[in-house]
Image (cartoon, rainbow, N blue to C red):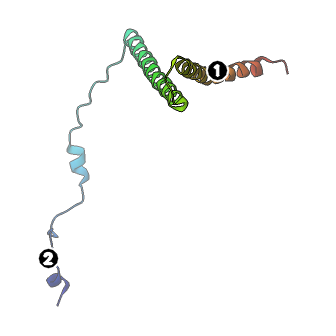
Amino acid sequence: MSKKDKFKFVKKEEENFLIDEEEIIKEEPKEKTEERKLTDEELIILEKKKKRRKLILTAVIMFLISNALFWFVILWQNRLDLLAVTDALTVTVLLIFAGGWDNVNMEYEHFISTYSRN
């Protein structure tokens, strides 16, 4: 029994799978889309949009974090009176301030180390 009898060929052997170089050369190059150069006004508008989007995203994230901190402190105290609410607001404000102060402190240390006379 030969190998050809055991297996059924799906593709014929006559097909050539190699790509001829002549066919590649004959093919027309695809039309390149013209890349439009942005003007200065369009660049300014894009930068403003990016900045506005970044600020809105930062505000939403900070709102969610402070809201989660507030409700965590309220649940931690296990009560809901005026003193508990003011305590929760105080803790939230202090933690958000401390997180922001870390960035300010790092910039201040960089300024001091850069311009010191050592």
Q: Residue at the spot x=43%, y=22% of the render?
A: 60
Residue closest to the eye, 91 or 32: 91
* Closer to viewer: mark 2 or mark 1: 1
- Image quadrant holding the C terminus, namely top right
Mark 2 residue element: loop
Query: Residue 111: percent from the left, percent from the top?
Result: 72, 18
Residues tagged 2 and 1 counted as in contact (Cβ below 8 A): no
Location of mark 1 (residue): 101
Mark 1 residue element: helix
Mark closest to the chain's N terminus, 2 or 1 = 2
Q: Residue 16, located in which quarter of the rendered image? A: bottom left
Residue closest to the eye, 70 or 58: 70
Q: Residue at the spot x=35%, y=18% of the render?
A: 37
Left or right for 57, reference 102: left
Q: Is residue 60 above or below residue 21?
A: above
Q: Residue 8's mark?
A: 2
Query: Residue 41: percent from the left, percent from the top?
Result: 38, 9
Left or right for 32, reference 47: left
Separation of disc 2 and disc 1 at Cα? Answer: 74 Å
Report crowding for label 2: few under 14, some 14 to 19, many 20 or more residues within 10 A (C-alpha).
few
Amino acid type shown at disc 1: Trp
Q: Residue at the spot x=52%, y=17% of the render?
A: 82
Query: Residue 56: percent from the left, percent from the top?
Result: 42, 18
